[in-house]
Image (tube, rainbow, N blue to C red):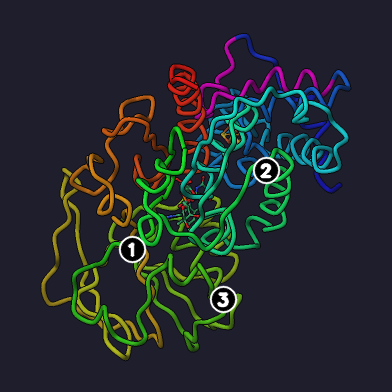
Amino acid sequence: MAFNVINEARRCLNCKNPMCRKGCPISTNIPEVIRTFLEGDIDKAGETLFKNNPLSVICSLICNHESQCEGHCVLGRKGAPVHFSNIENYISDNYFEKLDQGAVEELELDKVRKKGMRVGVIGGGPAGMTIAILLARKGYDITIFESREKIGGVLRYGIPEFRLPKELIERYKRLMVSLGIRIRPNTSIGTTITIDDMFRDGYRAIFIGTGVWKPNTLHIKGESLGNVHFAINYLTNPDVYTLGDSLNVIGAGNSAMDVARTALRHGCKRVTVFSRSEHIAASITEVEFAKIDGVEFVTCVEPVEITDEGAVFVNVEHDEEGRHHRIEGTEKLYPASSTIIAVSQGPRNRIVSTTTGLDVTERGLLVTNTFGRTTRDGIFAAGDVVLGARTVVEAVNYSKQVAEAMDEYLCGLDR
Ligand SMILES: Cc1cc2nc3c(=O)[nH]c(=O)nc-3n(C[C@H](O)[C@H](O)[C@H](O)COP(=O)(O)OP(=O)(O)OC[C@H]3O[C@@H](n4cnc5c(N)ncnc54)[C@H](O)[C@@H]3O)c2cc1C
Ligand code: SF4
């Protein structure tokens, strides 16, 4: 392999107070994993990673390492940090391959005593996958209800193949099937089947991990034109879009980078990303890769209208408090054949509108306590539908705690 993970692991100082671990949202025990790996026990290192974070192999590829684990490594203060994400990827990929082949025994279901209790998981994204795996391993009968054709959520229908190979999600599907988890694809809860139907059919607890799939809008003229699209819709299936030669992307977060880089790979010749602030919101690495791909950036502008010919922006300046002010008279058309709006998403209300007793915030996010209990007994939630648009590792971390809370709740019920 091009990058020598063994040499990289040897650079670890094995700090007594590991800052890398503090920087990781799921507190991966990085020094212990590295130590075990260097001692020659890669299976144990893999098991440690998987038990702490069932989506470790995915996080190793798509976490914002530079501001999390690697950004906190003390070696990074004077030079290069230990690139733990590469080490994690090597170990977790190896472990997962063995899981796939049944070559490690840790997860074998015959060791798990079945509890004979049904649990419904709505949404097959990172939050739902984590809950399903953890509760199946505790002996619950799990069914995942997924509104789309395949599981994975944003991992499949948002993050492009060049950043996250979809085969990884297929591996997770095989793992879940081997754990006895049932998957109902093309089944949107809150339409034909409701949560009350699920309780009627014997589900003792229900988990909602439906994410945020309703694009935020700009509320400006032109958003309904035929050459204007929303990022999350485009990324779901870029092949069906005809964008033409040039694209304006409004918004500069990680989704905007995914849109820009995907459009260039689908034939767009010129892609420009527009940001209201001077600072680009996406991670440094994603911006660097976008620039290498040829994406152009325009900062300190705000869109005022989208037309058939492109988008009109006005220059903005920022005061000391960080508030932005338009500079009148600076309106300018930036020509492009299409425009994609990438200014985040909020939740849909399909489940909330068909279920009594579920409170939501002003933004429509589900209200829960710290252990994921919603305002209705027996219904739990985690991930983006509670936190708003965040990250995979945060969705997994939260879901881990919720799985424990659900287990405790279920253990307290009559069989
Ligand atoms: C373009 C893009 C790029 C991103 N890049 C990164 C990144 O590089 N790194 C990172 O850490 N995070 C990234 N994120 C954020 C990350 O993907 C999310 O925080 C994470 O996926 C949240 O997981 P979730 O399970 O809560 O929701 P989701 O991944 O949204 O999954 C929810 C699932 O529920 C299903 N569903 C919705 N409604 C229903 C219903 N009524 N019935 C049944 N099923 C339903 C959906 O189809 C979906 O499969 C990105 C997000 C986007 C949009
Ligand atoms: S889960 Fe993410 S932040 Fe934590 S160690 Fe792995 S790559 Fe780093």
In this view, the mark in front (3 or 2): 2
Query: Relative to 138, is 145 on the left or the right?
Result: left
Secondary structure under tag 3 reads helix
Residue that sits furthest to the left in the current view: 328
Label 2 crowd bin: few (<14), some (14–19), many (20+), radius 10 Å: some
In this view, the mark in front (3 or 1): 1
Query: Relative to 322, is 119 on the left or the right?
Result: right
Observer-nearest of 315 and 224: 224
Please state the extent of the stretch shown in magenta in the rendering.
Answer: 17-38
- Which residue appears at 49% of the width and 62% of the height? 257
Between the C-alphas of marks 2 and 1, the distance is 30 Å
- Which residue appears at 21% of the width and 42% of the height? 361
Residue 357: percent from left, percent from top: 23, 39
Between the C-alphas of marks 3 and 1, the distance is 22 Å
Q: Is residue 18 magenta?
A: yes
Q: Which residue is mark 2?
A: 176
Q: Which residue is mark 3?
A: 264
Q: Which residue is mark 1?
A: 215
Q: Is label 3 in contact with label 2 (beta carbons under 8 Å)?
A: no
- Which residue appears at 28% of the width and 61% of the height? 276
- Using the rendered view, name the quadrant where residue 372 is placed: top left
Secondary structure under tag 1 reads strand
Labels 2 and 1: the sequence-earlier one? 2
Amino acid type at image mark 2: Met
Q: Which mark is residue 2?
A: none
Labels 3 and 2: the sequence-earlier one? 2
Observer-nearest of 49 and 63: 49
Amino acid type at image mark 1: Pro
Label 3 crowd bin: few (<14), some (14–19), many (20+), radius 10 Å: some
Amino acid type at image mark 3: Leu
Labels 3 and 1: the sequence-earlier one? 1
